[in-house]
């Protein structure tokens, strides 16, 4: 039995990880196979063999970025997998992760792919932005108590929470003004909690 498929698969994973690290540092939009191959110790011919073409590689890189995104979202849910922690606590945990310096490269890559998905909705970028919205809304929904989660009000609240997080993230990426943006997120959290307390219970 030939070991070539296994070797090729291992080499593909190795090069994908190297290409992903390179993309985190340099972005995806201007990616070109020849300079990328030189930067990661490969050749355009090998990349073409393993990934088909540039679009094939881009799809794999977007999928790889989503793996990191989903891992983060799972981490948000992990501390309380049996009890809903509430939307405010979920937003606070998500923001703490988003605002950490060590995640800045990944989030710049996310923002680049999100914007590209809106500008070029067909082809390799197809669905990236919409899928991201669905992923994040699902996590925020899981953090809501069932009575809130399954209501129209709950859907509006988590949509607003996502809008706050996404807007704050883009602001932070643009300005690096952590104190101002974090203060705004915490202000919105206080409004969430105040509004929830003000809603009359049946």
Image: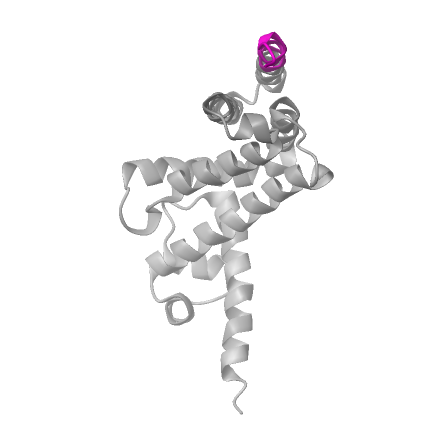
Q: Residue at x 49, y 80 (%)?
A: 5
Closer to us: 39 or 150: 150
State the image quarter where residue 119 is shown.
top left
Q: Residue at x 32, y 46 (%)?
A: 126
Report if residue 181 lies within the magenta region.
no
Q: Colour scheme of this structure image?
A: one colour
The residue lying furthest to the front in this view is 202
Q: Is residue 78 left or right of residue 108?
A: right
Q: Compared to 72, does 148 lie above or below?
A: above
Q: What's the magenta bit mostly, secondary-structure-wise?
A: helix
**Going by the image, does 81 lie left or right of 189?**
right
**Residue range highlighted in magenta:** 190-202
Is 16 placed above or below 181 here? below
Residue visible at 64% across and 25% down in the picture = 92
Which residue reaches farthest bottom? Answer: 1
Is residue 194 a member of the stretch shown in magenta? yes
Q: Point out residue 20 in the picture as x, y percentages from the top left corner.
A: 51, 53
Residue nearer the viewer, 144 or 106: 144
The one of 47 and 200 positioned closer to us in this rendering: 200
Determine the image quadrant of residue 139.
top right
Residue 52 location in percent, x, y?
Answer: 35, 67
Work out which quarter of the rendered image holds the C terminus and state it.
top right
Q: Closest to the observer: 139 or 11?
A: 139
């Amino acid at each position: 039995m030939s070991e070539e498929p296994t070797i090729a698969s291992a080499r593909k994973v190795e090069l994908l990880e190297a290409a992903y690290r390179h993309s985190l540092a340099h972005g995806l939009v201007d990616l070109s196979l020849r300079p990328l191959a030189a930067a990661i110790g490969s050749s355009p011919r090998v990349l073409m063999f393993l990934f088909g073409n540039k679009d094939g590689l881009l799809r794999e890189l977007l999928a790889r970025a989503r793996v990191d995104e989903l891992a983060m979202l799972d981490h948000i849910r992990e501390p309380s997998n049996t009890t809903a922690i509430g939307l405010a606590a979920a937003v606070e945990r998500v923001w703490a992760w988003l605002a950490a310096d060590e995640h800045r490269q990944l989030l710049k890559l996310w923002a680049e792919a999100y914007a590209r998905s809106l500008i070029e909705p067909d082809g390799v970028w197809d669905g990236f932005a919409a899928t991201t919205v669905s992923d994040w809304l699902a996590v925020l929904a899981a953090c809501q108590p069932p009575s809130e989660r399954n209501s129209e009000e709950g859907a509006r609240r988590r949509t607003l929470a996502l809008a706050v997080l996404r807007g704050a993230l883009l602001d932070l990426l643009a300005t690096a003004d952590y104190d101002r943006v974090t203060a705004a997120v915490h202000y919105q959290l206080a409004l969430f909690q105040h509004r929830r307390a003000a809603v009359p219970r049946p």
